[in-house]
Amino acid sequence: MQADAIFAGFRLLECGRERFRAAALVLAGACCTLPVIAGGYVYETPFTEPVRFDDVLLGEFPESFPKRDIHTLVAYIHLTGQFTEEHANLFRPRDRETVNRVNYQSEFWQAVGAEGYEPPPGFSPHRRESVVRTVELADGESYSYTNVLRVQNCMADAFKTAYETMLDRRARYGSGSVQLSRWIEAQIKVFAQCSGETEFDPPAEPAAAWPSLERHDRHYQIAASHFYNAQYLEAASRFRRIGETPDSPWRDLGRYLVARSLAREAIDNENDPERHLRLALEQYRELANEPDYLAAFPSVRGQISFIEARLRPVALREELERRLIEDPASLWAGDVGTYHYLLRQPEAPLDETSFRTWHRLATGGGDGQEVLERWREERSLEWLYLALERAQPGWDATTLTELLTSTAFAPDTPGYLNMLLHRIRITGILGDPDTGLRLAESALRIQPSKSHLNRIRTAAAGAASNWTDYFRWAPLTAISLRWSDDDARRLPANFNRITRDTPLFSKDTAALVNDYFTATMILEVLDTPELLPHLGPYLRGRLAIAGWTKAMLADEMATALELAQHIRIHVPLLDRELLAFQQAEDKHFEAARIVFDHPAFSPWIRAGEGRTQSISRPPRPMPDYIAGGTSGNNWWCAALNPVKPGEVPRIPRFSRYTEREKTAIRNVALMRETSASASFGPHVLRYAKENLDDPRVPRTLHRLVFATRHTCSWNAPGSISRGAFVLLHRHFPDSEWAEKTPHWYGEID
């Protein structure tokens, strides 16, 4: 058993209790967000990467500061100009040499196995804790439940110590010796207590005739056995005697474990917690006064801080906070861990220091006006940072302009990127997009990472005042995809070969195009030559398909014909199909035939990587003519929450629409109530009844029924599906298409 092992076990027990509390919230019906570990999920293409703590140490900050995280403190120290190399050394995560790199538990059991021994029956390093909790409901009722925690009782360091001790004793006594056998049998009894599931059976007291080393080992094993059995006061008494034995090899560790046993009695057994914690603290402080001991057991300082954190959390937090900011040389890494622990404890009254005020406002407390007042008083970088972040359209132009021009800062200024993005945003609020776009252009010269570049592009697009500027900046490139670039390039040319260099739309951009762009507007975007290199072939093809589908839904045939030409150019696979549409006499049927043949057709742009073949592992881009089993990847469905009649859509700030265009946009929103089958199915039925001799009719009827099955069968128009089914089986009963269509789908009102 090592000191660090016991300390880690203490912390692990605390973590286990936190997990229990989280579970209790879920059982109590609290609103929680939990990761889904089974079933389907929506994959969202990542365009940015989270800011890591290493980045924060270098002066790059997350978009928002959490209340209970040390990132906020480090950012404040940076912004106030106090950050030094001592801070960096103190906060920098250390590559601790942990015992987890070697599985000493496995090594130990293999070593004793070579001597003919096995682990005790039912061995586990974890013990189970059953905790009964009562939940009070809002209506005055309550219920109780039992939660079982699985807590690691015997840590990896314990097995490391046991393994190394066994190797030493085997070398001293010899393999197969009586002394080694006695040591192994006793150690197995010690580890039998780890699970808490076996009857307490500690090793027997040593015989007086045994060699001195063997007696010392046995006394330590007995004390450890009581410790793992949660008999902490008995363990403390035995460890104290070991610590008072001058020739015991376990003397120094025994002194340490007296305090650890007392702390466990307070925390684990909840026995007179304050008294036993103070006794443990007194013991640790005594050890800390011995320089040689402290050098051998540096974790003593961490234990002192941890106990103080339980005895006087508010005072210690304020003290550590002050020293972390002003005097980092007086602290060590364990104090940072203690401060982090204190941050995660329930809120307690704290004095309103400069940092506490900034922390409160940086993490969501107060409002923008309070931040603005603080900045006007201080005129410092830390308050400028928050003022830029909180700037709102309701602030007067003089204030916003003052924020933009008050301080010049370089790329090495802490928080530079976030302040730059907010400055770009503010230029949009002021109606001065040219300045914002110049700021974005200047940022590109520092060669930002892909994640930063995407953030800059998003901010610039948000400040744009016209379509050209918007679509010049809005396309992003993915940080990662579910396939490699080489996998994409090896696919046939008629696949959507998306790589990490392919311009794509974010969810916000896709939603903007879907809800507020008519077919005519999309055509205008595609007809703008300077946008072609920014959109790329993939997005141009997707826009052309969405615009063409919208045009057909709105019965805007002239626009549809122009967009068909764009599809032919940007989606070569569909060249012949759209040429046939352009030349057809019955363009509505021809359009329906194309739509039902190609499940990628939709009036809505898909964000990120678009359609995927979800049945492949890993998923691959899905060709336009393939219908996967996942209905969300095929055509489109009637909206679950359609736009209310007469509702006026929000007008994007960068656009200025005529009344006619507003009406057209409103009609686009109403298209949310359509579906592929309901919109194009009637044209197929009409044409089929009038043109039974057309050889394309049987297959098109089959595809219509197929679409009602493979898009949204839960709201498929049953009358259309059944109508196509009846026509197919009545007039073409012997065709291969009737054979492939044994059912129709949907409900009939």
Image (cartoon, helix red, strand yellow):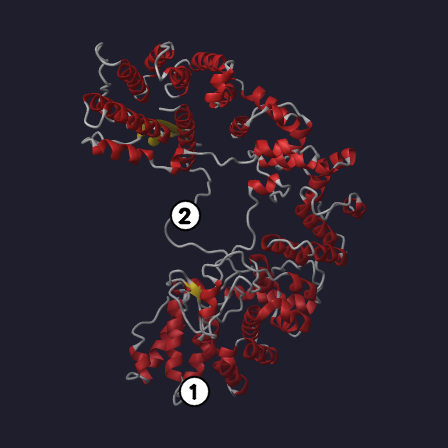
Of the residues shown, which amino acid type is indicated by label 1?
A: Glu
Q: Residue 293 location, x and y as percent?
A: 47, 17
From the image, tell me which residue sits under label 1. Answer: 690
- Judge from the rendering whether residue 660 lies leftward or rightward of residue 3; answer left or right: right
- Judge from the rendering whether residue 152 lies leftward or rightward of residue 560; answer left or right: left
Q: Residue 700 location, x and y as percent?
A: 40, 80
Numbered disc in front, either 1 or 2: 2
Q: Please tell me whether mark 2 sits on a helix, a strand or a loop.
A: loop
- Judge from the rendering whether residue 678 lies leftward or rightward of residue 451; answer left or right: left
- Between 195 and 174, the one nearer to me in the picture: 174
For the N terminus, the quadrant is: top left
- Between 305 and 134, the one nearer to me in the picture: 305
Of the residues shown, which amino acid type is indicated by label 2?
A: Val
Q: Please tell me whether mark 1 sits on a helix, a strand or a loop.
A: helix
How far apart marks 1 and 2 lie (CA) works out to 51 Å
From the image, tell me which residue sits under label 2. Answer: 36
Q: Earlier in the sequence, mark 1 or mark 2?
A: 2
Q: Given the current orientation, which residue lies at the most extreme bottom position?
A: 693
In which quadrant of the rendered view does residue 77 lie? top right
Q: Residue 409 location, x and y as percent?
A: 74, 45
